[in-house]
Amino acid sequence: MTSLIRANFIRFVFLIVIQFVLKGVDSIDIYIYPLFILLLPVGMIDGVVLLVAFFYGLSIDMFYDTPGLFASASVAVAAARPLVLAIMEPRGGYEPGKAPTKYNLGTRWFVQYSGILMLWHTIWVVALEQASLFSGLRVLIWLLIYALSLLLIILYQFLFNPKE
Amino acid sequence: MQRIFLFFIKYNGVFAFFLLEVIALSIYFTRNNNANTQAFLSSANGLIGGVYESTSRVARYWNLSAVNDSLARENAELKMRLPNSKFSSLIQSNTIKDTTLQQYYQYFDAKVVNNTIHRPRNYLTINKGAAQGLRANSGVLNGNGMGIVGVVQKVSNNYAVVMSILNLDTRISAKILGNNNFGVMIWDGLDSRSMNLESVPKHANINKGDTIVTSGYSTIFPEGVLIGTIDSFYQPPGVNFYSIKVALFNDLNSTQYVYVVSNLLKEERLKLEEEVIND
């Protein structure tokens, strides 16, 4: 357990350093930092994964001068992670608490897993960076409207629990 | 009630996702208006600024020869402005001691310690800040006097973050030298050597190669700072304005030394203009 935390902490710092070096590459952005989120242990509570990803993304944002961009991308990757893990669950299931690495699950599995999540990450980042079409607040208001409406609709089911 | 509680625990991921995304996206989309989030997150933040300063120190060592060249070029540029390097075509002149002139613009020199040009929204960090007298919303000019670099967005004690002209949010008031038709300079996010001049009415007489300078209508840049020349232009159908492509004088990718210009009478002017709008 402690070795798992230590490994992840070292990876946290190490990947930020590599990402900082990659930032020096001119004319193209290459991202390695989402690997940290990809490799968090299977079976971690979703809320905790998202919270860790959020603060991890914020520290990347500090270096890139893009407040919120990579924080939101990290959270998006962390949110998609359990879905992809569920789709790609091998026969016999995962060993709980193990990191989903190439070592544990094989090259083919890991390439597919990281391929899907990095594609999602790229779509998210590119869409946000080009989002000048939507003025910022409007998008935010849409999201709020969506989240609050959904919450109300679900709460309604719990309060009245209609049969038909 | 208990079932609702259990529901929240079961779907903690979904709720955490929405909550954190709302926070992150609100930080992202309000980054230009919210002083607190930006000062905390941007490299005006002392720690990150320090990291950049030290990496830039290493890079500076490797760039010494290039720096030498650029300084020599700048020296030559400045020497050309000395009075004795100019031929005076004035036949007669009167010298009047003028006590009515008041300092209007103040200039600071600064060094770029961080810079990007390939993102849709680019920022620079420079190594002067509030302690040296810099203030937000000051203009930033290229070190050799040709071209503009951006607008100071936020300052900390010793650093300032500059919104580059290569930023989708940049709006700079500019005019065509000679006929004084003015428009707005914006960047389309594609080419780091050119910007677009919009809102110039179709009745204006413009030619390829015309010089574009700052208009002085905003309180950020002084009037007449060189920006670039007209590279090409066309009249989009159905619109009353030209679409003009401007080739910039300066290459933002090699900018090392800049001048920050701050307008000493800005507050007075903005206050007056605001009073009229509020009335």
Image (cartoon, helix red, strand yellow):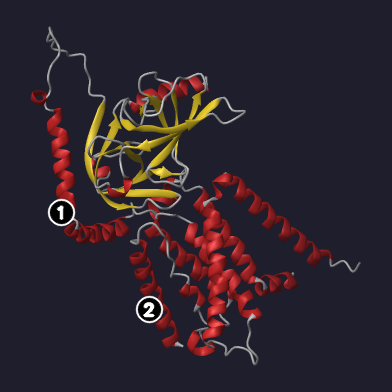
**Callout 1: helix, strand or loop?**
helix
Quadrant housing the C terminus of chain A: bottom right
Q: Position of residue B57 (x, y in %)?
A: 20, 58
Which is more toward the observer, B58 or B47? B58
Which chain is indicated by disc 2? A
Q: Nearer the viewer, residue A9 or A15?
A: A15
- Label 1 neighbourhood size at 10 Å, few (<14), some (14-19), many (20+)? few
| Residue visible at 14% across and 11% down in the picture | B90
Q: Which mark is residue B42?
A: none
Please provide percent x and percent y for residue B216.
Answer: 36, 25
Q: Height in image: A102 above or below B32?
A: below
The residue type indicated by label 2 comes to: Ile
Residue B120 seen:
yes
* Residue A48 in view, yes or no: no
In the rendered view, tell whether residue B251 sits above or below residue A52.
Answer: above
Q: Relative to B228, does residue A3 appear above or below in the rendering?
A: below
Position in image of residue A71 (x %, y %): 49, 62
Residue found 32% across the figure and 25% down from its top: B223
Residue under pointer 1? B65
- What amino acid is found at the position of numbered circle 1 in the picture? Ser
Instruction: Determine whether B81 is above or below B161 in the image.
Output: above
Chain on which label 1 sits: B
- Find residue A157 and report its horizontal and vertical position in percent: 80, 65
Left or right placement of residue B143 versus residue A37 in this view = left
SS for tag 2? helix
Q: Work out how far the residue at label 1 is from the one at label 2, CA to CA, in angstroms.
A: 38 Å
To which residue does mark 2 refer?
A10
The residue positioned 12% from the left and 20% from the top of the image is B87
